Image (spheres, rainbow, N blue to C red):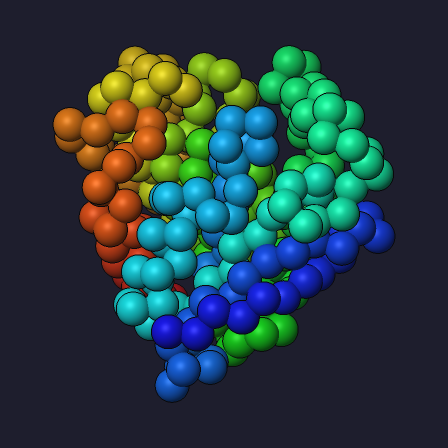
């Protein structure tokens, strides 16, 4: 398995990322991985995101995981740690996450250039990253389908998905602090097909020791999307 450090740009800011793939599969179909919220432990080294990167390479995909602006070594207009924390806290308190969307939106074009463009790109997002990935996946032509893990239904509006006819997978847990089972089922019901809702039993928001299972489900879903296409 190859892990290559890369960078790309959003709003003139240099963002860091890691491309992961098998050495003998340089033209593999691509998956963009979107991390949780930076103020809640969200970066490209998150356990779920890293699990997705590893398993997706094993299952024949190339992935890109990245850090939003101000996270890790990604550039940010804010300079010190306190300013960066306050900057990201705004996206939790008033829903102003347009910069994170811009960072996510810049990634599919970069990723397409690294692999076989005819396959397009898939997106898998976790928690806050599920919202970012869904927004970008829903309205970006080169994105063929997307998967969400712990989509925070009831916290963020998913109205942007009510006309989305792309293939969508929603994975959720029974004891998730970011949402409830009821909110998840209600939110899912408002989203048009094609869609799949899958429960990971006996888990919570963090999916400890279940990263491989989740990643296999996500990649199997994307493989089905490739077969369908």
User: What residue appears at the point 21 percent right and 29 percent down from the top-left corner?
Assistant: 203
Percent coordinates x, y for residue 43 in the rendering: 53, 42
- In the depicted view, which residue is nearer to us: 187 or 87? 87
Q: Residue at x 72, y 30 (%)?
A: 81
Figure check: 105 above or below 29: above
Side of 16 relative to 3 (left or right): right
Residue 221 visible:
no
Report the residue at 55% width, 31% height from top. 37
Q: Residue at x 41, y 20 (%)?
A: 178
Residue 134, horizontal then vertical, whole percent? 51, 40
Quarter assignment of residue 220: bottom left
Image quadrant assignment for residue 132: top right
- Relative placement, left or right, of 90 versus 124 is right
Along the line of sight, the residue nearer the viewer: 121 or 94 = 94
Using residue 112 as the reference point, say whether residue 75 is left or right of it. right
Res 179 visible: yes
- Which sits in the foreground, 221 or 100? 100
The N terminus: image quadrant: bottom left
Q: Position of 37 compared to 96: left or right?
A: left
Determine the residue located farthest toward the bottom in the rendered image.
Answer: 24
Furthest residue in direction left, as rendered: 202
Q: Nearer the viewer, residue 86 or 226?
A: 86
Residue 23 drawn above or below residue 89: below
Count of picture labels:
0
| Residue 205 horizontal/vertical position (percent) | 33, 27
């Amino acid at each position: 398995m190859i892990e290559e450090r890369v960078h790309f740009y959003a709003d003139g800011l240099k963002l860091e990322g890691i491309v992961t793939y098998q050495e003998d599969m340089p033209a593999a179909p691509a998956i963009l991985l979107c991390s949780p919220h930076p103020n809640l432990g969200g970066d490209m080294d998150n356990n779920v995101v890293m699990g997705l990167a590893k398993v997706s390479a094993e299952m024949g995909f190339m992935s890109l995981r990245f850090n939003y602006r101000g996270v890790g070594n990604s550039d940010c207009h804010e300079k010190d740690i306190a300013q960066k924390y306050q900057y990201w806290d705004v996206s939790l308190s008033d829903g102003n996450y347009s910069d994170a969307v811009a960072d996510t939106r810049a990634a599919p074009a970069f990723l397409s250039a690294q692999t076989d463009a005819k396959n397009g790109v898939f997106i898998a997002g976790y928690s806050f990253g599920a919202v970012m990935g869904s927004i970008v996946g829903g309205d970006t032509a080169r994105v063929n389908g997307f998967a969400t893990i712990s989509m925070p239904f009831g916290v963020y509006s998913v109205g942007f998905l009510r006309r989305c006819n792309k293939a969508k997978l929603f994975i959720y847990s029974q004891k998730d602090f970011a949402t409830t089972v009821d909110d998840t089922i209600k939110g899912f019901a408002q989203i048009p097909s094609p869609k799949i809702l899958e429960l990971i039993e006996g888990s919570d928001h963090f999916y400890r020791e279940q990263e491989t299972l989740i990643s296999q489900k996500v990649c199997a879903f994307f493989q089905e999307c490739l077969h369908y296409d």
